[in-house]
Image (cartoon, grey):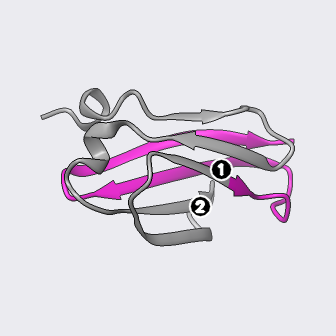
Amino acid sequence: ANIEHLFGDTNVFPNPSKGKIFVEIDPGLISVGTYELIITDLTGKNVFSAQNMFTDKIELDLTFLKKGIYLMKLKGNKGLITKKFVIE
């Protein structure tokens, strides 16, 4: 199955952001158990991660990140979804 299609309703906003972002997770990702949230910069370096996530709405304070483009990976039992966001 196409993971982007399964969990395509996951949203990261505002995008671009000053550092505080909200994530609304597609219920399909949560219905199969917990998931892991990983944020990397474009070089692939992990800048933030959280395990055993289970909620469908998250507020993250990423004001410690430098301005730039980041990738948020949400990894669950059914697969992985990646969302790109910008800190300005």
> Helix, strand, or loop for circle 1?
strand
In primary-sequence order, the first of circles 2 and 1 is 2
Give me the disc on residue 40: 2
Residue type at the position of mark 1: Tyr
What residue is disc 1 on? 70
Mark 2 vs 1: CB contact within 8 A: yes
From the image, give the main secondary structure of the stretch colored magenta: strand
Viewed as shown, does residue 68 lie left or right of 1? Answer: right
> Helix, strand, or loop for circle 2?
strand
Q: Position of residue 10 (x, y in %)?
A: 45, 34
Magenta-drawn segment: 60-88
Look at the image and say whether residue 68 sits in the magenta stretch: yes
Q: Position of residue 35 (x, y in %)?
A: 35, 61
Residue type at the position of mark 2: Thr
Q: Is residue 20 above or below residue 77?
A: above
Mark 2 crowd level (few <14, some 14–19, many ≥20, 10 Å Cα): some
Q: How many marks?
A: 2
Mark 1 crowd level (few <14, some 14–19, many ≥20, 10 Å Cα): many
Viewed as shown, does residue 17 lie left or right of 28? Answer: right
Picture residue at 40% right of the left edge, 27% below the top: 9
Picture residue at 20% right of the left edge, 58% below the top: 77
Picture residue at 27% right of the left edge, 27% below the top: 5
Q: Position of residue 33 (x, y in %)?
A: 24, 59
Q: Quadrant of the C terminus?
A: top right
Q: Quadrant of residue 2?
A: top left
